Image (cartoon, helix red, strand yellow):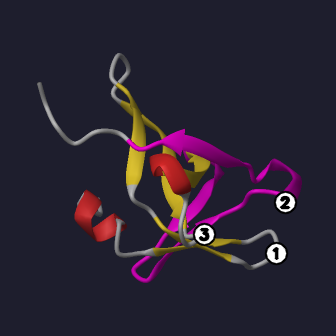
Amino acid sequence: MRKMSTAEVRELEVINLCGGERLGYACDFELDLDCGQILSLIIPIDNGFMPFGKKEEYVIPWGRIECIGEDAILVKVPQNELFRCECAKKSKRHR
């Protein structure tokens, strides 16, 4: 069994096999806490300055990951299914 920490996963470039484009580096994961499963990989899109604390992200379903290697994460997402999601930045402050 191979093991990898989330910190190590964040250092791997994500490459889409449908077109060969580099999507960026994973910054987060979406989890299903009831089932204990990873649902998706979140990749920020660097568009320069985004006003009002908004950012765009690729949300890659976990089932679209073909391979997690030593140097890269290979995903297979057709261009027509590669959506950019605009999400508000989450506050880091806890109340």
Please say whether residue 14 is one of the residues in the magenta stretch. no
| Label disc, if present, on residue 79 of the rendered structure | 2
For the residues carrying marks 2 and 3, which lies nearer the camera in this image?
3
Quadrant of res 71: bottom left
Quadrant of the frame with the C terminus:
top left
Q: Determine the CA span between mark 1 and mark 3.
A: 20 Å
Circle 2 crowding by C-alpha within 10 Å: few under 14, some 14–19, many from 20: few
Which residue is found at the position 13% from the left and 31% from the top? 94
For the residues labelled 2 and 1, say whether their Cβ atoms are less than 8 Å apart: yes
* Magenta stretch: includes residue 72: yes
Other-residue count near label 1 (Cα within 10 Å), few / some / many at <14 / 14–19 / ≥20: few
Read off the magenta span.
62-89
What's the mark number on residue 19? Answer: 1
Q: Earlier in the sequence, mark 2 or mark 1?
A: 1
Q: Which residue is mark 3?
A: 47
Foreground: 30 or 66?
30
Q: Secondary structure at mark 1?
A: loop
- Secondary structure category for the residue under label 3: loop
Looking at the rendered structure, the kind of residue marked 2 is Gln
